[in-house]
Amino acid sequence: MKQAIVFIALLAISLSASAQMSSWKITLNKKAVIKSSTVDDTVANVIRVKKADLSNNNLFKIEFDDNKANEVPKGWVRSIGLFDEKGEGTAQKDSADQIFLFNKDLLKIIWTRKKLNICAWLAPADPAMAKAIRIKRNVLGVLILED
């Protein structure tokens, strides 16, 4: 049993490393604001927006671009979400390579929080296996509402 847990943990670590090699693009108002493949870089991957930027009917979009070597392994799913500084989820989509939010909906979410972390993670599709391992959320970027 211990060997199985160690194997699953090592598998999760290797999958987390392969997930970091994927690249993604974050688009706001039809303009790519971040194109990156570096996770947890909260200095370079910062998006500063004003209320006027979000006061239209355009989209805020996060898209993953997996090449064949970095596809999500069979039996695993990628989730993408927005989290406040306390770690509470404000928007999340499971089994996804992209997530879309209307700017007005994003403004409602960020208005009281002022700062959101954009995260992605891989998890086993099997709930029993997911309970046995610790899943790390990779921060893709930080969204900050400026006055």
Image: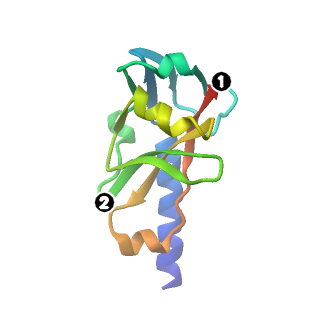
* Image side of residue 79 versus residue 10, left or right: left
Looking at the rendered image, the disc whose residue lies closer to the viewer, 2 or 1, is 1
- Neighbour tally class for label 1: few under 14, some 14-19, many 20 plus, Cα within 10 Å: few
- Residue 44 vertical placement versus 19 (above, below): above
Residue extending furthest toward the left: 74
Q: Quadrant of the C terminus?
A: top right
Q: Is residue 33 visible?
A: no
Q: Is 85 displayed left or right of 99 in the figure?
A: right
Which mark identifies residue 146?
A: 1
Q: Observer-nearest residue: 26 or 67?
A: 26
- What residue type is disc 1 on? Glu
* Residue at x-position 35% and y-position 36%: 98
Closer to the camera, 3 or 16? 16
Residue 141 pos. (x, y %): 58, 34
Name the mark on residue 75.
2
Q: Secondary structure at mark 2?
A: loop
Q: Where does residue 116 sit, x and y in percent of width and height?
A: 58, 39
Find residue 129 and name its label: none
Considering every residue shown, the one lying at the far top of the view is 31
Q: Kindly identify the residue that appears in the image at 42 percent across and 26 percent down.
A: 103
Q: Amino acid at mark 2?
A: Gly
Distance from the alpha carbon under mark 2 to that under mark 1? 40 Å
The picture quadrant where one finds residue 74 is bottom left
Pointer 2 or 1: first along the chain? 2
Q: How many marks?
A: 2
* Contact flag, marks 2 and 1 (Cβ < 8 Å): no
Q: Is residue 125 left or right of residue 52?
A: left
Across and down, in percent, residue 93 comes to 36, 47
Q: Residue at x 33, y 68 (%)?
A: 126
Q: Secondary structure at mark 1?
A: strand
Give the x, y percent position of residue 111.
56, 35
Q: Quadrant of residue 136?
A: bottom right
